[in-house]
């Protein structure tokens, strides 16, 4: 049994807390939001984001960060990507040597182009940071629907220990040393999912979405490999796997926001209606900046930026994608 705290009481943090408690660990959930803490303590339910799913009475809930971190072996960072830096900064004074931080959020910081694990390491000096990613909607994990993810760590022993900690009969965990690739796949697929939602909002069909997902894989792979990620990672759970589920699921906040944008709503109107953080909006600009830095073409993500931030009509963006210069599907294949 391990002592574990989950920092963040949204849908994903709550679902993982339930999973870890069921696996026999001593689990505490921390939230900065006092009303959220009170709701979880009193109702034993995340009514706003996971209605109908009850927390075990064994899970402790607190808004005291020092209390949540003291004596814990594992700290799961489950706050939205835009709050990772502020949470890590607040957590830094209470971090104890030997604690393993597992980041489960997905994104890239626009102002620094840092991955989330890099942000945590920047704020908590000497921290040991791993990542967990893959096709894993909280709404399904909380209801014990079979799910497979990957945990990434540069330390093999830590990866194996986390694999054991999170795994059970319906939640299978693979391991990987490619932390960079896992994080980039998780961040970039959210931008492609916005595009997939826009396609649905425009009432396009299965052909359109299949093409978009396939070319989206090509974009995130090109950029990820240029930055040092491994090609195998982008064809795995945190690449294609996460991309497919985020582009097609009714649970996907990025896809759902894209649908609203395709129907004519502004980015802000879509985010307000979804009522949760739409990570792809925050990663879109960062992805474009990285592509420029590494001289990589990412036309889908480029058009998503045009629609999100420059009021380009979604249908015009699709037309511009189709009217690009003709190309080979794979440049390294020759006649």
Image (cartoon, rainbow, N blue to C red):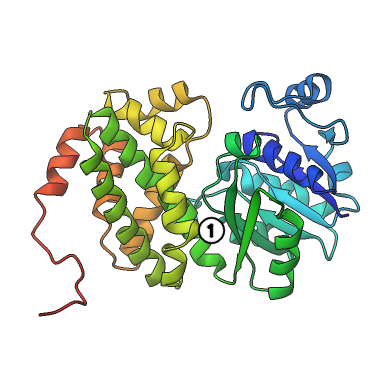
Please give the name of the residue rendered at 48% of the width and 41% of the height, measured from the top-left corner: 279
Q: Nearer the viewer, residue 68 or 135?
A: 135
Q: Nearer the viewer, residue 332 or 316?
A: 332
Please give the name of the residue rendered at 27% of the width and 24% of the height, measured from the top-left corner: 263
Can residue 5 be seen? Answer: yes
Q: Quadrant of the N terminus?
A: bottom right
Residue 284 position, x and y percent, is 38, 47
Q: Quadrant of the C terminus?
A: bottom left
The answer to whether 175 appears left or right of 160 in the picture is left
Can residue 227 be seen? Answer: no
The answer to whether 207 appears left or right of 131 in the picture is left
Q: Nearer the viewer, residue 79 or 243?
A: 243
The answer to whether 241 appears left or right of 38 in the picture is left
The answer to whether 211 appears left or right of 280 in the picture is left
Residue 158 position, x and y percent, is 73, 69
The residue tagged with tag 1: helix, strand or loop? loop
| Category of crowding for the residue at label 1, using alpha-carbon neighbours closer than 10 angstroms: few (below 14), some (14–19), many (at least 20) | some
Please give the name of the residue rendered at 65% of the width and 50% of the height, measured from the top-left corner: 171
Please give the name of the residue rendered at 72% of the width and 54% of the height, measured from the top-left corner: 166
Residue 106 position, x and y percent, is 53, 49
- Check disc 1 and report the residue beneath it: 115
Count the labels in the image. 1
Q: Is residue 163 above or below residue 61?
A: below
Judged from this view, the residue extending furthest toward the bottom is 335
Residue 58 position, x and y percent, is 88, 35
């Amino acid at each position: 049994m391990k002592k574990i705290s989950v920092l963040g009481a949204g849908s994903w943090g709550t679902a993982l807390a339930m999973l870890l408690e069921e696996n026999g660990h001593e689990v505490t959930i921390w939230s900065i939001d006092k009303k959220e803490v009170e709701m979880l303590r009193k109702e034993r339910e995340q009514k706003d984001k996971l209605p109908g799913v009850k927390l075990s009475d064994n899970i402790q809930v607190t808004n005291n960060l020092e209390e949540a971190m003291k004596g814990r072996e594992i700290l799961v960072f489950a706050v939205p990507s835009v709050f990772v830096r502020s949470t890590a900064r607040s957590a830094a004074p209470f971090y104890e040597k030997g604690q393993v931080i597992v980041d489960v959020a997905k994104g890239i910081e626009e102002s620094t182009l840092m991955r989330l694990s890099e942000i945590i390491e920047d704020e908590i000096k000497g921290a040991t940071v791993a990542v967990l990613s893959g096709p894993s909607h909280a709404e399904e994990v909380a209801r014990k629907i079979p799910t497979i993810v990957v945990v990434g760590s540069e330390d093999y022993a830590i990866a194996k220990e986390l694999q054991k900690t999170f795994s059970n009969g319906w939640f299978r965990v693979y391991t990987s040393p490619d932390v960079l690739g896992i994080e980039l796949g998780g961040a970039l697929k959210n931008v492609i999912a916005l595009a997939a939602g826009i396609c649905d909002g425009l009432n396009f069909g299965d052909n359109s979405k299949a093409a978009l997902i396939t070319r989206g894989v090509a974009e995130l792979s090109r950029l990820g490999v240029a930055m040092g990620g491994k090609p195998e990672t982008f064809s795995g759970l945190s690449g294609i796997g996460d991309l497919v589920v985020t582009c097609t699921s009714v649970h996907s906040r990025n896809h759902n926001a894209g649908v609203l944008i395709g129907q004519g709503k502004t980015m802000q109107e879509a985010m307000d209606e979804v009522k949760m953080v739409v990570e792809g909006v925050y990663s879109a600009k960062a992805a474009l900046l990285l592509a420029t830095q590494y001289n990589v073409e990412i036309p889908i993500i480029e058009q998503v930026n045009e629609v999100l931030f420059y009021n380009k009509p979604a249908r015009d963006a699709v037309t511009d994608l189709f009217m690009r210069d003709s190309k080979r599907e794979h440049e390294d294949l020759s006649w």
